[in-house]
Image (tube, rainbow, N blue to C red):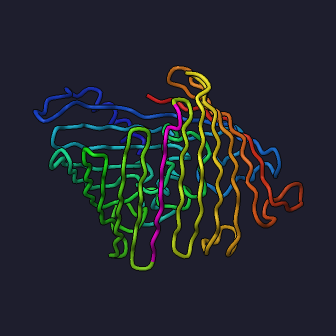
Amino acid sequence: MYRLFYLIITTLMTAQFGHAQDSLGWDLSGSVDVYYRYNIQGDYDLAPGTSFSNLPGFSLGMANLKIANDGKKVGFMADLVVGPKGEDATFLSPVLRPGGNSSLINQLYVYWNVSEELTFTIGNFNTFLGYEVISPVDNFNYSTSYLFSYGPFSHTGLKLDYAHKSGFSAMLGVFNPTDATEYNPDNTYTAGVQLGYTFGSGSVYLNGIVSKDFYQFDITAGVDVTSDVYAGLNASIAKDAFSGAAAYLQWAASDKLKLGTRLEYFLDNGLGLFGKDESVLDITLSGNYTIGSLTLIPEFRLDMNSTDIFSDDDELTNALSSFVLGAVYAF
């Protein structure tokens, strides 16, 4: 698998790019992230019940390489990941999830720009639901929210995206069961829909997925309150699973330093994470200090559960407090 990763990179780097008449050019981008994690309150190896960045001590995130060729009419994206976070994001199939994702592939799709407003995409792509994403480059907080962790990570199928110059947009799609990437394991399908509006200082999106026995709907929104202050919102409900909301506030103290917080309330409606009708409050304070292409993210996080579920020196408590220092290099 790692030889395949190396072969793809070397082939692209030695190819004569731009040979196709339709091509607007090749693009290589990605990231590398590592981190340190320490529990201020709670046993050494405990972690919040959220995805990624949960290993104790000095730990590895992932290496992420995006290879794209954007054309006037057609193009593709290959998004490859390796490392513990990459394995979690793709479920390390077939070892942990038979019929699921390849541990190397985060996204793999082709697209056709039918017109300036309409795009047809088929393949595997990261989910359109939720506020946070897999790549640490596109998240302000280094740790992730409960709403992100228990929603879908990716979809395999086809979708039609419509974007009007007025700022309104819409998406319709049909997908394999959520996070089943390589093929459809049980001949069932999921419908996806999105309505959006982008305006001068922000945007708002209504998102949903619906299958025979499940649905999830959510709203994501963000606005530049001032030139230095940004506010975001995510609220979601999933049938017989969870509901909750998260608010985000970020302040640019200087060109290099930004400070921000995430306040999240998450209710277990049958997911089985805490217990029926049990909840957790996540308070996360993060800094982003940028040095060229490197961003250092010191973070303090407090998870307060409605019941005592965290162990601390052989005693149970309802709170887990932790410190994380993330280092993210983007190229």
232 left or right of 307 in image: left
Instruction: Measuring from the top left, give residue 154's x and y in whole percent.
Output: 42, 56
In the image shown, does 83 or 141 lie closer to the viewer?
A: 141
Image quarter of residue 10: top left
Which residue is pictured at 51% across the width and 34% down the height?
A: 32
Image height check: is 258 above or below 152? above
Which residue is pictured at 78% across the width and 45% down the height?
A: 39
Magenta-drawn segment: 214-226
* Residue 47 magenta-highlighted: no
50 left or right of 184 in image: right
Instruction: Measuring from the top left, give residue 265's x and y in whole percent.
Output: 65, 59
Secondary structure predominantly adopted by residues drawn in magenta: strand
Residue extending furthest toward the bottom? 213
176 left or right of 316 in image: left
Which residue is pictured at 44% across the width and 79% down the height?
A: 213
Image height check: is 257 above or below 32? above
* Residue 218 magenta-highlighted: yes
Which residue is pictured at 52% across the width and 40% down the height?
A: 136
